[in-house]
Image (cartoon, rainbow, N blue to C red):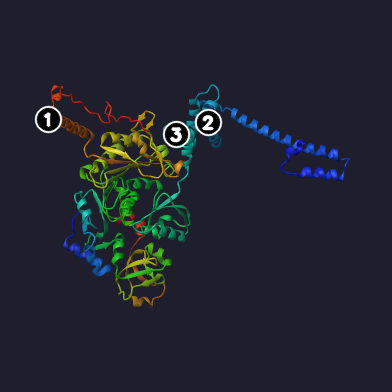
Amino acid sequence: MESHDESSSHEGPEETNQKRDLFSDDSGEEAETALELKSRQRQEQQELEEKEAMEELQMRDSYRFIPPTMEELEAEREMGVELPMMHERIQEVVRVLSDFKHLRFEGYNRNDYLKVLKSDLVYYFGYLPYLIEKFLQMFSPAEVVELLEANEVKRPVTIRVNTLKSRRDDVAKKLIERGVNLDPIDWSPVGLMVYDSTIPIGATPEYLAGHYMIQSASSWTPVMALAPEVGETVLDMAAAPGGKTSYIAALMKNTGQLFANDVSKSRLNALTANIHRLGVRNCTVINFDGRAIPKHFSSFDRVLLDAPCTGLGIVSKDPSVKVKRDRQDIDVLAYTQKQLLLAAIDAVNANSKTGGVIVYSTCSVTVEENEWVVNYALEKRCVKLVDTGLPFGKEGFTRMRQFRFHPSLKLTRRFYPHTYNMDGFYVAKFVKYDNRLPEEVAESEKAAEAKSKSDSEEAATTNGDNTNETKKPRKKRKRRKNRNKTGNHKRRKVE
Amino acid sequence: MRPLSEDEFATLFKKLSKYIGDNCRYLLERSDKQYCFRYHRDRVYYCSEDLMKKSASIGRKNIVSLGVCFGKFTKTGKFRLHVTALDYLAQYARYKLWVKPSAELSFLYGNNVLKAGLGRITENTPQYQGVVIFSMADTPLGFGVMARSTAECRNLGPEEIVCFHQADLGEYLREEDTIV
């Protein structure tokens, strides 16, 4: 009986069937049929449901989203568009673009969909069209939407414990007693993440005593990459308001000499106050334009440059960035950043016993402010990129649209709000191997090679080797070590 | 940046000795490194010699702070101690006052210490003596001047002032702009 196969999970019908056989003989046949009918009905119902589900799935797959034209969009704006509907449309277009070959509507190309998406993103999230284009250039549409949505939400509050005055366990215990809900951060030995608190975190007696500092987690990464050691001479070129500077001092254990520089006088107050509050004793606060620093100093062991940037990675902290930053801002800032980075490199002594390290960081996600600046420095100074030593982070780009960068750019690290729940950040760690300029190094190498060749020739002739006398004098070939004809770094095949 | 003159040194140490007495000399006679005082724009800074040497070449317009700022000289030549010097004062303090947790916040807001908030106090503290004020967890909170001697404090009512407020950690928030 087929009913047994269908309802094998429960033996009710079987038992009841047998029971009925026992009790009534003549209605046995009818009972079986009724039961059979019931189970058949159930089976049919199941099949029908499955079929409907399949149809729905197919219908959804075969549902082709038609992108509205520009005129339709404008008309929509004038009438007043509903945000939930726009949000749904954004999701639809992203879905289509993710599998364009199968999901596109016939007759419409990728650009039509992209136009709709850009216009919707500009309106829904409130960015300049230029910025939306920039994000779409760097990420897939789905990731762009993730990034923009992450920018709408604030990142969790994080605290860095000041090891000059306290320990993480003590601070955590005291704050929990006061009514703060927090957890230690696993990738940092001094970090605490605050979930919620009944009291203002920035006004506890422990805060005033300098036991901790409210600082976003991504700001710890450049100092961790810098890894200053005890007894060194370190410079923080753009130090205000002093979170990174005090972390550097804590890692140096108040030894050595730390210089905290900032160009804006108004922010120096906060910097000095923070330094005093956190008990930093080895620091001199100075007020220079970063680009002028190499004229006054030239022998730092390590330099940290947290360059002024557009702040496109910290939109959640400062939403005005969405409409303030345009093409000119990025260009001007990129130029300043390049100058500052060269100055930072010039201020470091390559022959320092323990260091020769420069860390460049920004709180932006654009390639113009990050990889481009780093690549420029690689070409202009005798520096090389090394691993930042950070436990996580996405690799920097080696190619993006029209840019082609040195393959070592892979060692730099990018952080995004939607992947790590940290502010958008970029960190690059350089090691300076020579105090001279690359051209001088190349020339001196040439001279040294020529000298060694002539030396070896002399030595050979004095030995009385006949074969050398008959040889023609060798042509001095210009030795290009890593550079191609245009003088750029040769692209090496990366395994 | 220049070294302090004789008079300035005298004024500085007179003020410091109100709080830390003879221990003043330990500020300059240190076993680990040589430290020194320097004067810049009416303010007195305390830092190690090697930091001072490296910073010596920085121009007056460009240097803002050097090591730890102890305080400033007022226009009439008196020396005013700032809360930024608290760590050193607490280290060498001779007379200490511990404040109950209930009165901690009140003191951090800038109020004087009342008898109700008094936890512990060093024996034989004379009247008008400079004291360093600690929380019960031994965190320095600020410093002040005794209104009454230890013996007199025992007989005070709960609302009477025990110690006048001179400086507290709350100034880092309240007076961020003027403190350094």
Residue at point 42% right, 31% down? A137
Residue A328: give x, y in percent of width and height.
Answer: 35, 33
Residue A272: give x, y in percent of width and height.
Answer: 30, 53
Residue at point 27% right, 68% down? B20
- Judge the density around disc 1: few (<14), some (14-19), many (≥20) Cα neighbours within 10 Å: few
Are labels 2 and 1 on one chain? Answer: yes
Horizontally, residue A156 falls left or right of residue B129, namely: right
Quick check: A78 above or below A195?
above
Q: Which residue is mark 3?
A: A139
- Which element type, helix, strand or loop, lies under badge 3? loop
Q: Quadrant of residue A292?
A: top left
- Which element type, helix, strand or loop, lies under badge 1? helix
Horizontally, residue A424 falls left or right of residue A482, namely: right
Q: Quadrant of residue A438?
A: top left
Determine the CA span between mark 3 and mark 2: 15 Å
Q: Between tags 3 and 2, which lies in front?
A: 3
Amino acid type for the residue under numbered disc 2: Val
Whether pointer 3 and pointer 1 mark residues with C-beta atoms closer than 8 Å, the reply is no
Q: Between tags 3 and 1, which lies in front?
A: 1
Task: Say which of A462 and B105 sits in front.
Answer: A462
Are labels 3 and 1 on one chain? Answer: yes
Q: Which residue is mark 1?
A: A463
Task: Say which of A342 and B156 sits in front.
Answer: A342
Quick check: A126 above or below A108?
below
Task: Say which of A112 and B170 sits in front.
Answer: A112
Q: Earlier in the sequence, mark 3 or mark 1?
A: 3
Q: Which residue is mark 2?
A: A93
Amino acid type for the residue under numbered disc 3: Phe
Q: Earlier in the sequence, mark 3 or mark 2?
A: 2
Q: Chain of mark 2?
A: A
Amino acid type for the residue under numbered disc 1: Asn
